[in-house]
Image: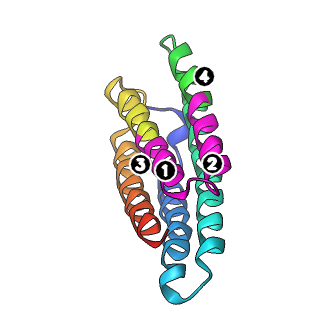
Amino acid sequence: MDNPMYREKPLSSLLAYLGALPFWAIAIAPFAGIDAAMAQSAFIAYGTGIACFMAGTIWSQAQISPAKSSGLLLFSNAAALIAIAALLLHHALPVPALLLQAGTFLLLLLADHRMFRKGDQPAWYFALRRNVTALVLLAYGLAIMGA
């Protein structure tokens, strides 16, 4: 596969794992004595940004896919809107909002898996997405425990 989206394996991998670190730093903040409400707000806000970014990667991949990809385009928009909805719901319903946003990350991974199975992604990229998503979902679990 010679897709230009996948030419930066070392840097992409580094940035993806570094991107998971703030989830963990913010998730443990309430357990370290940081104001829990502030930490929860920061967590859901960061999650919104990253979920929208990941939805954008699905959008980009759908644009260059040789197959008809209107479903992926619609999905990428829906995923971003769901992440934003979770942000808006967070102050009223913190745990359901965190669960909704965590589910968004799982759905984004499933979209990546679909593209990987169709041959639109290299194995290393899907493995990276799977591993980082697992780290992020574990951080969501910790954030829910601190809510």
Q: In whole angstroms, how far apart are the C-alphas of marks 4 and 2?
A: 31 Å
Report x, y in % for residue 66.
50, 15
Q: Which mark is residue 96?
A: 1
Q: Of label 2 and label 1, which has the lower sequence position?
A: 2
Q: Give the residues in magenta.
A: 78-106
Q: Of label 1 and label 4, which has the lower sequence position?
A: 4
Give the label, 3 or 2, closer to the camera.
2
Residue 64 picture quarter: top right
- Residue shown at the point (63%, 48%) measured from the top left: 89
Give the label, 1 or 4, closer to the camera.
1
Q: In whole angstroms, how far apart are the C-alphas of marks 2 and 1?
A: 8 Å
Specify few, some or many for label 2: CA neighbours under 10 Å numbering under 14, 14-19, or 20 or more.
some
Give the label, 3 or 1, closer to the camera.
1
Report x, y in % for residue 135.
39, 61
Residue at the spot of label 2? 89
Specify few, some or many for label 1: CA neighbours under 10 Å numbering under 14, 14-19, or 20 or more.
some
Residue at the spot of label 4? 63
